Image: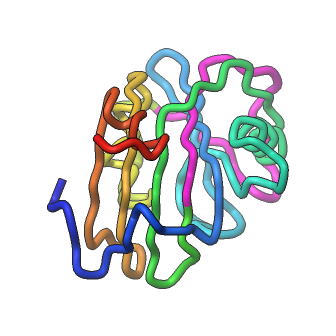
């Protein structure tokens, strides 16, 4: 953690994101299934499949649907690992629910939205991903819960606050920790 407050950070307890979204990281053994994002926010970056939560949809329903749309797979055992809070200078502010899974049906298939990419967890291409991923992804793949807030300016982190374990789950629910 850099510091508890930054002069440009939002009033997090009262912050309202413009977008609510999800991310999924399917992993099996020493490998993780990533995508090359071909459309939308983050186009050209490596990430996990995911996207915007539709009205009336739960985050878990969304992440399953997005994997079906982007990769033609259905995740069978999604587990929520964390929440990301992004205050962005040049993109909409985003609240993102992060999931992992180890089982799925179907074959990861390229679509107009994404190209599938299996890689070794030890070789995750963080230099081609959003900068924040290096702060929490390895821990999430190990089964750790997390909560992370990031202040971005032009795709660079200006400030962050990351928590792991039981205290992070309390933060998801808005409890004081």
The location of residue 122, given as percent across then percent down, is 34, 31
Residue 90 is one of the magenta-drawn residues: no
Residue 126 coordinates in the image, percent (x, y) = 38, 51
Quarter that holds the C terminus? top left
Using the image as rendered, state which of residue 17 and residue 13 is in the foreground. 13
Q: In this view, does 112 lie above or below 31?
A: below
Question: In the rendered structure, which segment of residues is drawn in magenta?
Answer: 95-119
Q: Left of 134 or right of it: where is 15?
A: right
Residue at screen point 27% across, 55% down:
161
Look at the picture and state if 26 lies above or below 52: above
Name the colouring of the figure: rainbow
Main SS, magenta residues: strand
Q: Nearer the viewer, residue 131 or 33?
A: 131
Q: Which of 56 and 134 is in front in this view?
A: 56
- Relative placement, left or right, of 57 versus 169 is right
Residue positioned 49% across, 41% down in the render = 173
Residue that sits furthest to the left in the current view: 3
Q: Position of residue 20 (x, y in %)?
A: 65, 58
Q: Residue at x 26, y 67 (%)?
A: 159
Residue 27 x, y percent position in the rendering:
54, 25
For residue 102, side relative to residue 54 (left or right): left
Q: In the image, is residue 99 part of the stretch drawn in magenta?
A: yes
Q: In this view, does 103 lie above or below 113?
A: above
């Amino acid at each position: 953690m850099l510091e508890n407050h930054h002069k440009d950070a939002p009033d997090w307890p009262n912050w309202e994101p413009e977008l609510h979204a999800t991310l999924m990281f399917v992993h099996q053994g020493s490998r993780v299934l990533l995508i090359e994002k071909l459309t939308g926010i983050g186009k050209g970056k490596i990430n996990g499949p995911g996207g915007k939560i539709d009205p009336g949809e739960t985050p878990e329903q969304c992440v399953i649907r997005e994997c079906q749309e982007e990769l033609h797979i259905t995740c069978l055992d999604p587990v929520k690992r964390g929440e990301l809070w992004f205050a962005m200078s040049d993109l909409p502010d985003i609240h993102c629910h992060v999931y992992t899974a180890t089982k799925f049906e179907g074959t990861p298939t390229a679509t107009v939205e994404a190209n599938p990419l299996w890689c070794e967890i030890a070789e995750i291409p963080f230099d081609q991903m959003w900068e924040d991923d290096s702060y929490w992804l390895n821990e999430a793949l190990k089964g750790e819960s997390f909560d992370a807030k990031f202040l971005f300016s032009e795709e660079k982190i200006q400030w962050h606050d990351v928590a792991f374990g039981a205290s992070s789950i309390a933060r998801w629910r808005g409890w004081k920790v």
